[in-house]
């Protein structure tokens, strides 16, 4: 069942979201990007990755937690260790998540 | 759009394969979204409509939470826009790699750009020697996330009141873990390490202190600023030697 009120809300959400997605993707086709900005753009992916990793690990509940008791920190340590040792992305993710779930069961938190 | 060549097909397959770890990470969030959307009072059809045409995890979570609190359309739509402003930076960052494809392609692949497909796509474009990126890769990357997100939302919506919170078991860590495995190989110099450190500190501090997704934008601004300053200093030093 689709109620008109919620359909209107969702369609407007979709328009707002698509506007942000399509807004600047065509910029380089229209205008020459300034060399300084072009250089700055080189650092965008690592910055975004850092922002997607660190807050989620250091403050999983939205607040800073002690690193020693935070299972997300230990899960990350295991993920990094497995990646460095085996160079296998899948294995690192799976063992990282599995170890965190086990820590949840046995240690809590 | 011309008929896909063998190379286009190859790029498409590569896009699917390289996005799989991210798609795995998206799965529990799609489930959780489906569950809380139903609990917030949306119907299954509405829950799915949102996943299919909005297709933006963070803003969908936020929307169902504020729908549940009784907020109206203007607040929901404005919040959606603000939460998704970070896409502008991602689009800008991808635009040099897509400057030779048609505007139609750009508008098409833009629809399915998420945090996950952006990271996978931009990393792939930077790794390949060609200056231009294949739109087929981005299409496959975004498309993979889209399919997983839609399927997981549906399962979550159907399970509805049966599941309490699929994120509490610890599988929510799959997402940051996947991003972590993307980040690590990219830290190839002390300069990049410094950028990561600044973005991590600023990102985490603003995540704790400021509601919404501003922390990503603040981390990007300070991180790229750090990178450009360090790069300029290094060039000056090299020139003066």
Image: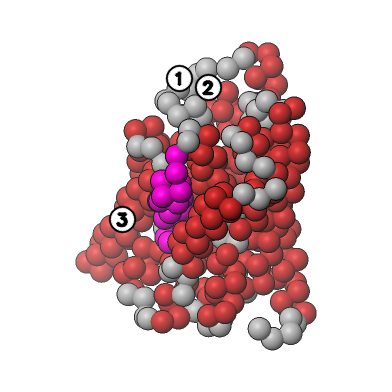
Q: Are marks 2 and 3 in contact (CB under 8 Å)?
A: no
Closer to us: B169 or B224: B169
* Alpha-carbon span between mark 2 and mark 3: 31 Å
* Alpha-carbon span between mark 2 and mark 1: 6 Å
Residue that mark 2 sits on: A70
Residue B81 included in the magenta stretch of the image: yes
* Alpha-carbon span between mark 3 and mark 1: 30 Å
The quadrant of the image that shows the N terminus of chain B is bottom right
Q: Is residue A39 above or below residue A79?
A: below
Q: Residue furthest front?
A: A4
- Magenta part of the protein: which range? B71-90
Closer to us: B118 or B104: B104
| Residue located at (72% from left, 69% from top) | B12
Tag 3's secondary structure? helix
Residue that mark 3 sits on: B225
Q: Is residue A88 above or below residue B130?
A: above
Q: Position of residue B201 (x, y in %)?
A: 37, 38
* Quadrant housing residue B34: top right
On the question of residue A9 being in view, the answer is yes
Q: How busy is the neighbourhood of tag 3: few (under 14 within 10 Å), some, or many (20 plus)?
A: some
Tag 2's secondary structure? loop
Residue that mark 1 sits on: A66
State whether discs 3 and 1 lie on one chain. Answer: no
Q: Position of residue B130 (x, y in %)?
A: 57, 76
Q: Are marks 2 and 1 in contact (CB under 8 Å)?
A: yes
Tag 1's secondary structure? loop
Closer to us: B186 or B222: B222
Residue A56 included in the magenta stretch of the image: no
């Amino acid at each position: 069942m689709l109620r008109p009120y919620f359909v209107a809300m969702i369609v407007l959400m979709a328009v707002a979201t698509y506007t942000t997605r399509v807004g600047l993707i065509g910029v380089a086709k229209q205008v020459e990007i300034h060399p300084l900005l072009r250089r700055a753009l080189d650092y965008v992916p690592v910055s975004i990755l850092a922002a997607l990793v660190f807050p989620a690990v250091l403050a999983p509940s939205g607040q800073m937690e002690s690193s020693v008791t935070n299972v997300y920190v230990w899960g990350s340590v295991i993920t990094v260790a497995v990646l460095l040792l085996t160079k296998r992305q899948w294995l690192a993710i799976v063992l990282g998540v599995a170890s965190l779930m086990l820590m949840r069961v046995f240690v809590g938190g | 759009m011309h008929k896909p060549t063998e190379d286009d097909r190859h790029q498409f397959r590569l896009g699917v394969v390289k996005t799989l770890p991210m798609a795995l990470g998206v799965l529990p969030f799609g489930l959780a979204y489906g569950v809380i959307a139903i609990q917030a009072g949306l119907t299954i059809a509405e829950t799915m409509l949102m996943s299919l045409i909005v297709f933006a995890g963070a803003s969908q979570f936020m929307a169902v939470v504020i729908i549940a609190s009784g907020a109206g359309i203007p607040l929901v739509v404005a919040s959606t826009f603000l939460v998704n402003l970070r896409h502008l930076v991602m689009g800008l960052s991808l635009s040099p790699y897509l400057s030779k494809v048609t505007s139609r392609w750009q508008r098409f692949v833009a629809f399915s750009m998420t945090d996950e497909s952006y990271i996978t796509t931009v990393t792939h474009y930077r790794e390949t020697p060609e200056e231009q990126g294949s739109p087929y890769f981005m299409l496959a990357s975004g498309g993979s996330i889209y399919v997983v997100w839609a399927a997981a939302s549906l399962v979550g919506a159907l399970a509805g009141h049966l599941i309490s919170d699929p994120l509490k078991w610890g599988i929510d860590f799959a997402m940051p873990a996947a991003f972590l495995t993307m980040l690590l190989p990219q830290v190839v110099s002390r300069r990049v390490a410094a950028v990561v450190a600044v973005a991590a500190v600023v990102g985490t501090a603003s995540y704790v202190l400021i509601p919404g997704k501003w922390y990503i934008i603040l981390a990007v601004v300070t991180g790229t600023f750090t990178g450009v300053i360090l790069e300029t200093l290094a060039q000056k030093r090299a020139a003066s030697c």
